């Protein structure tokens, strides 16, 4: 094995494919804009259609469109001419992929699609081909040469076709105003979905597990309430309307014991005299990642959770948030 020759060929391949994509970018114009508008205006779905390497590209692009706000599915042209064409309905836009623009299976379904008035976008290397001439918008994927040393295997042409499909999907995504929150909503199982969908409400302790006391409760009684709850280290101090007036934590207790000469007297004090007033709080709708950031910044392990009226509805512990694997 000649290592230098292998690396030279690899670099040549990347260089050819890079240049092919660069040239494709230079060719973008009115047809690309028209294709984008067709996808933005459609009431149905994008239907990706191709065979061979173009089919593999189409399957990948189907996932890209579907995950970025454009409903899409893949239709195999050989199956389409035997009944699967019925999957295409009014309002759909078909995106056909073919390097030559003369793929037999695609040519056979073109008349049926044209008769029904289905919008057609072609990503192909020959504008004047059968496919190119019958499409409403043609995105030019032509390349000067393939990266294959024999000039046979679809390499630069396949990469360029995929890059143009990605460009189309991303342009439409941008035009729609598709946000990271939208992305997360259809990716609930991914790390991004967890980060953008998981909220404090998913981890907070409520009801009996939300330790609350009145302002006149003694420090000793606060400790008993604190240790009885499933969440440790904090009690919320609330008024008669359940509105938060402060918190008392195990950290507050340690500081009291270190500075007080009479520890028994400390235990008898009403918590209102020693609590932390105006503590940092979160709402049930606060993102879990944001709550973790607040806790780390403030160097606290728990945060009281308040509703819109400032009433205590729960408490959240950093360990419970970390178990959700949002960071």
Image (cartoon, grey):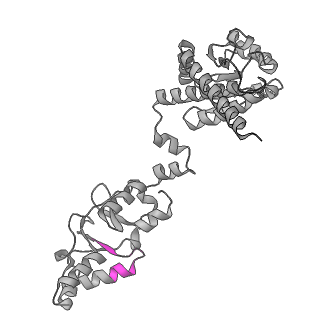
294 lies above or below 162: below
Measuring from the top left, give residue 178's x and y in whole percent: 48, 34
Q: For residue 269, which quarter of the picture? A: bottom left
Measuring from the top left, give residue 221's x and y in whole percent: 28, 84
Q: Is residue 230 on the magenta stretch?
A: yes
Question: Image point 36% across, 57% down: which residue?
Answer: 293
Measuring from the top left, give residue 263's x and y in whole percent: 20, 89
Q: Nearer the viewer, residue 67 or 14?
A: 14
Range of the magenta residues? Answer: 224-236
Question: Image point 40% across, 70% down: which residue?
Answer: 207
Q: Is residue 45 visible?
A: no
Question: Image point 52% across, 49% down: which residue?
Answer: 193
123 lies above or below 213: above
Left or right for 92, reference 260: right
Left or right for 70, reference 239: right
Q: Is residue 280 on the magenta stretch?
A: no
Left or right for 202, reference 291: right
Question: Image point 22% across, 70% down: which residue?
Answer: 276
Q: Nearer the viewer, residue 140 or 79?
A: 140
68 lies above or below 263: above
């Amino acid at each position: 094995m000649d290592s230098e020759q292998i690396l030279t060929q690899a670099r040549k391949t990347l260089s050819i494919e890079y240049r092919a994509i660069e040239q494709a970018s230079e060719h973008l114009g009115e047809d690309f804009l028209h294709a984008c508008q067709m996808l933005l205006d459609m009431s149905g779905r994008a239907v990706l259609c191709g065979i061979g390497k173009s089919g593999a590209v189409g399957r990948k692009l189907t996932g890209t469109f579907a995950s970025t706000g454009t409903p899409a599915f893949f239709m195999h042209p050989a199956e389409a001419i035997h009944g699967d064409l019925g999957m295409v309905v009014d309002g759909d836009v078909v995106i056909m992929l073919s390097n030559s623009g003369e793929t037999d299976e695609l040519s056979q379904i073109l008349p049926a699609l044209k008769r029904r008035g289905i919008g057609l976008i072609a990503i192909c290397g020959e504008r004047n081909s059968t496919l190119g001439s019958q499409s409403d918008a043609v995105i030019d994927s032509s390349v000067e040469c393939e990266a294959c040393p024999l000039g046979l295997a679809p390499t630069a042409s396949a990469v360029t076709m995929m890059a143009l499909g990605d460009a189309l999907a991303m342009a439409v995504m941008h035009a729609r105003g598709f946000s990271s929150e939208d992305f997360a909503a259809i990716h609930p199982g991914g790390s991004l979905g967890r980060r953008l969908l998981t909220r404090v409400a998913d981890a907070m302790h409520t009801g009996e597990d939300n330790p609350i006391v009145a302002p006149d409760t003694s420090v000793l009684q606060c400790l008993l309430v604190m240790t009885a709850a499933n969440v440790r280290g904090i009690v919320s101090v609330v008024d008669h309307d359940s509105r938060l007036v402060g918190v008392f934590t195990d950290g507050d207790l340690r500081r009291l014991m270190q500075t007080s000469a009479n520890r028994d007297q400390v235990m008898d004090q009403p918590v209102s005299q020693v609590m932390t007033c105006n503590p940092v709080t979160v709402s049930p709708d606060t993102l879990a990642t944001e709550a973790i950031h607040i806790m780390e910044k403030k160097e606290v392990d728990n945060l009281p959770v308040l509703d819109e009226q400032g009433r205590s509805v729960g408490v959240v512990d950093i360990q419970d948030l970390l178990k959700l694997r949002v960071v």
